[in-house]
Amino acid sequence: MNQAFRRSRFILFLLITLFGCKQPVDESRIDKDPPRVVRVWPLPNSVNVEVDSVIIVEFSEEIQGNSVVLIVQGSNGEIAGELTIERERVHWQPLLTLAYSTTYRATVKAGVKDLAGNAMKEDYSWTFTTENAPVVPDTIPPTVVSTVPPNGAQNVAVMTTIVVNFSEAVVVPPQGFKMTKGDLVISGTPVSSGSTFKFTPKDSLDYNSTYTCTLTTAVTDTAGNHLQQNFVFSFTTEKEPDVTPPQVVSTNPQNGATGVEREVVIRVVFSEEVNVPTDAFSLKDENNNFVPGSQSIAGAEFTFTPQDPLTFNTTYTATITTAVTDLSGNHLPQDFTFSFAVKPDDISPEVLETYPTDGDTGVAKDTDIWVKFSEPIDPASVNATTFAVSGADGNVNGNYMVDNDTARFVPDSLDWQTTYTVTLSGITDLAGNPMSTYSFSFTTQADTTPRWINPYGGMKRLAITDEGYIYTLAAGPDKWVVMKFNPDGRIVWFKGLPEYAYYSRDIAVYSGGGQDEVYVLTAQYDPMGGAPSNITKLDGSGNIVWTSPDFTSNAFKLEVGEDGRLFIPNGRLYEFSTTDGSVVHIQDIGTNNSKILSVVAFADFIYVGGETFEDLFGTAVSSDWFIAKYDANYNLIWGVQFNGPDSAAEFVGAVAVDRVNNIVYIGGGYGKGMSWVYDGIASYNDNGNSASFLWFQRVTNNTSVIGDDGTRMVAYNGSVYYGNSVHNTPVKVLSDGTIDWNMTSNGVEDFVFYNGKMYVLFPYPRSNKIYIFDADTGAPLN
């Protein structure tokens, strides 16, 4: 449409609406009618609307400009535009030219208000369609986009179809395409469809041949534009198929070969390059066991490397299956097998690795010793002679184990910081080949473990077994415990005592029954001093066996006889059942003025000692020590009383018996009035049915008060050892009454003997450690 004519028509519309349609307004009438749309441009449902048109909406009366919302939507959504208001008219100018051949919807949203504020109740919408785009003549020639096969392609199938893709729909006349092989023109069927042209040769193409395709300028698009120049591309067809199957040319080892090395790599050479799948080759021994390994292929040569050396004197069979193919996919015609035999074993085993290594130091004391050989070894050849471990004290005993190529020795025990030599000789492989002598040495670690120490605090009272294990009453993490030390001074275990065990008194052990029986004397809490006592029995592993019923208060000493009988001397002599802790016998002597305060029991005799203020045996009066000897059934055999010098008061602390020399000792403290003078020991010769006095010896000159619970006296190796918790002791007295040595320490809590050593527990603050002395000389050993 002519542009000038469009502008004229638009101006005419404006003049008509401006001057011909305006109505006078009656100012006296109250306006209650909302505005309404009376005219729009473009007209509703109009077509061929110019793409640069302005949308105009005219209302029935003047409107408020800020109340107008005009939305224009096309196929891609809302269109942006600029809105202007002139009294009752609305002009909407799109920011961009409208699209060709597109239907638009214009909508005036409800809410448009006149000057009186009356609002339009409903949306007003209409549609229009823009003009078609002007037709532009096609002057662009077609081009070739791609070909199948592409130019220069190789190995193209001989049954291929030629495909050419153009940039647009084309017309390919007969003279527009030609396919040749040299001077030979290839006949076939051409087909055009849109922008694609296909040519199917009439016959199969020749193998391994080059073909040329030419598209001439006779090719045109639908507007008649010609291909600007000939388009030429070439390709080469596939080679003629290989139908000859591969063959095995040679193998190594050859079929039937003997004396083959264990480390052999199997090789198979084929007649041509092949593919060998993983499962196409297998190697089995004579027991039909598969041999694991790795395989590789390089051209026509296949190799298989066994994971481990093959077994001596064994026949192996290799199988290559028909899964093997050449590069053309032709399979091996049939399975191929060959066998060979590995040579007999004539190689001696060698040591590859040891633990500990030669010269190793700081080796754990509980380590196992193992040796790894170059091959499996005969378990029967490994023994104390062929695998010898020796230290400073000679050969070490232990157990031997063999696992394939490794021999292991588990020692019964190794010593601390000791050099050991391992000598290997005569160990054979499975074929009987003996090894050459091989030796290596190592040194165990130093012992840094604290010994004879209670890490939780002090200890009180000791008891020792026939094997040198020591039990003690000790402070534990939060209460009194029984603690067990081994002969090396290391804690084996500790066991907490029952909650009611408030005071710890004494401990004793019986080890003659095959397992240790440990007895602990404790007292319950009583601020008035009258708390009952209990005995708790434990086994050698620390398990509580039983706890006795409550019995008399203020018991301090607990003794176990050499036959396992259990006693408490506490004024009266109480014997308890070792089964449940009940009292089985009570032995009195004299009247209430006599007290049994110590006991030493053997299988055949029981010796008791104490103090008395009466004449028990018709031998003395006043304040005396006494000793009485009973048979196992508490029948009195003899009794003696001893009245010390200076008319002092005597208080017995302990009795000791030397069965070898038939000497009985009694010891305790002497005093005058409230002053304590010294400790002393009296000795008697046990004549069987009577006793004769030997000597009396003072052992201290202190003035501290002692108690019955604080005195210890033991006869050991022909001497007697005496001590208490507050005087300068322990002291050793020879069998003739001569004092051999005195440690002059600030008292002693307890002491026991084993293997020529004296194990001593001193009072606080030294009570957290057990000290060891030479029992003969008194020299310290730790």
Image (cartoon, grey):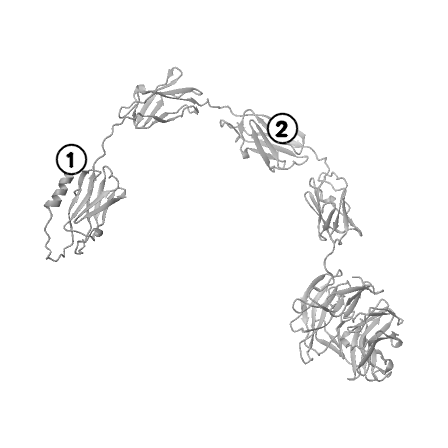
Q: Could you say where residue 383 lies in the image, as x and y percent from the top left?
A: 75, 46
| Horizontal relation, residue 240 to residue 112: left or right | right
Residue 539 appearing in the image: no
* Element marked by disc 2: strand
Q: Quadrant of residue 746?
A: bottom right
Query: Which residue matches tag 1?
Result: 5
In the displayed structure, 362 sits above or below 736; it is above
| Horizontal relation, residue 710 to residue 254: left or right | right
Is 257 or 148 nearer to us in this picture? 148
Is 706 or 82 nearer to us in this picture? 82
Q: Quadrant where the N terminus lies?
A: top left
Q: Residue at x 40, y 25 (%)?
A: 150
Q: Could you say where residue 407 lies in the image, as x and y percent from the top left?
A: 71, 45
Q: Could you say where residue 96 lies in the image, as x and y percent from the top left?
A: 26, 40
For disc 1, the neighbor class at 10 Å (few under 14, some 14 to 19, many from 20) is: few
**Type of the residue with mark 2:** Asn
Separation of residues labelled 1 and 2 (CA atoms): 102 Å
* Element marked by disc 1: helix
Q: Quadrant of residue 190?
A: top left
| Horizontal relation, residue 698 to residue 771: left or right | right
Q: Could you say where residue 158 lies in the image, as x and y percent from the top left?
A: 41, 23
For disc 2, the neighbor class at 10 Å (few under 14, some 14 to 19, many from 20) is: some
Query: Which residue matches tag 2?
Result: 252
